[in-house]
Amino acid sequence: MNDTSSANGRPLAERLATRLLYPTSRPRNDALRQAVSGRVVLVTGASHGIGKEAALKLAAAGATVLLVARSLEEMEAVAAEITASGGIAHVHRVDLTDMDATDRLGRELLDEYGHVDVVINNAGRSIRRSIDQSYDRFHDFTRTIDINYLGPVRLLLALLPSMRERREGHIVNISTWGLRMPPAPRWAAYGASKAAFDTWLRTVATEIAADNVTTTSVYMPLVHTRMSAPTDFGSMPGLTAEEAADVVCHAVVARPVEISPWWSGPLQAWSDLTRGPAQRLMSRTFRR
């Protein structure tokens, strides 16, 4: 295999750059099994991409996985793959932008399963569009805020009382590395919606910690999935959905407060200290 060979369709140079920029932690099988075996784990956006791969790994480790998404046939295929391997999965079709349906889902899950131990908030929508192309597209902002912020808030408002009463629970939010970087042109709708839920969850975390309910914010780098495919990222290094699922499983096992690329802290500090120059740099990049 030479320097231009690929694995999973990715050139060697891109894979090496990905490993350098986004090293991932894959929990030991026994550690993951100890963390989730016999527990009820809810995964939103479970029909494709990161959600699907995370559900497969969690079910293989012994979790009872609740699959939540809009795509019924795709979810049923994921559930069939899990059960064929001896795992347990249940399908729950819901549109998380429907607040009444999302509230009903939360109450129905508690009625059916008694409790939910872990919530993986993964469902989301990405829109990349400049502001001058958005003047007559207010719906871009409402549809991103509904799925990336209001939907997960509505679901957790239904599930949190049970977690706090049982004094046990963990919430993993799949956020974006964009919140750890200077604001990037064209991402206003997406970035604002992700920032809203990120702030909400980190604020709520300070209130629920005393009840032994923990949270992890995963500032996920670029992941090559169906959601990111419409945006032309070229050969930009990024994780596969399976690699990203390893990060999610690590979050479930280790329960850190946050997970982010190693370089995001220094970059954020630089952008905070040099906000004017950083903004001008991004502006020049956008014009080019």
Image (cartoon, grey):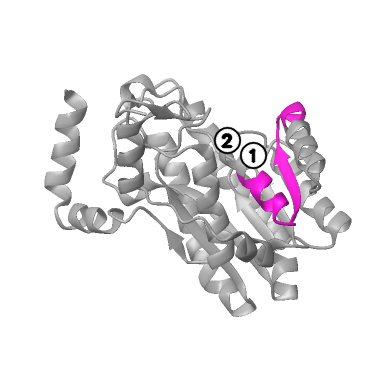
Residue 93 in sight from this viewpoint:
no
**Which image quadrant for residue 249?**
bottom right
Residue 194 in sight from this viewpoint:
yes
Residue at screen point 31% across, 56% down:
262
Residue at screen point 43% across, 40% down:
239
Numbered range of the magenta stretch? 54-74
Nearer to me, 207 or 177: 177
Q: Quadrant of the C terminus?
A: top left
Please, what is the three-letter code of the amino acid marked with disc 2? Gly
Is residue 199 left or right of 17 when viewed as pictured?
right
Residue 9 placement (x, y as % from top left): 45, 25
Nearer to me, 269 or 34: 34
Please, what is the three-letter code of the amino acid marked with disc 1? Lys
Q: Is residue 177 above or below residue 211?
A: above
Q: Residue furthest front?
A: 1
As for residue 69 lying within the magenta part, the answer is yes
Residue at screen point 62% across, 59% down:
29
Residue 138 placement (x, y as % from top left): 47, 27
| SS assignment at label 1 | helix
Which residue, given by chain and number where applicable, does mark 2 sit on?
49
**Which image quadrant for residue 92?**
top right
Residue 72 placement (x, y as % from top left): 76, 30
Which residue, given by chain and number where applicable, does mark 1 sit on?
52
Disc 2 crowd rating (10 Å Cα; few below 14, some 14-19, many 20+) is many
Residue 34 placement (x, y as % from top left): 68, 67
Q: Marks 2/1: CA distance?
A: 5 Å
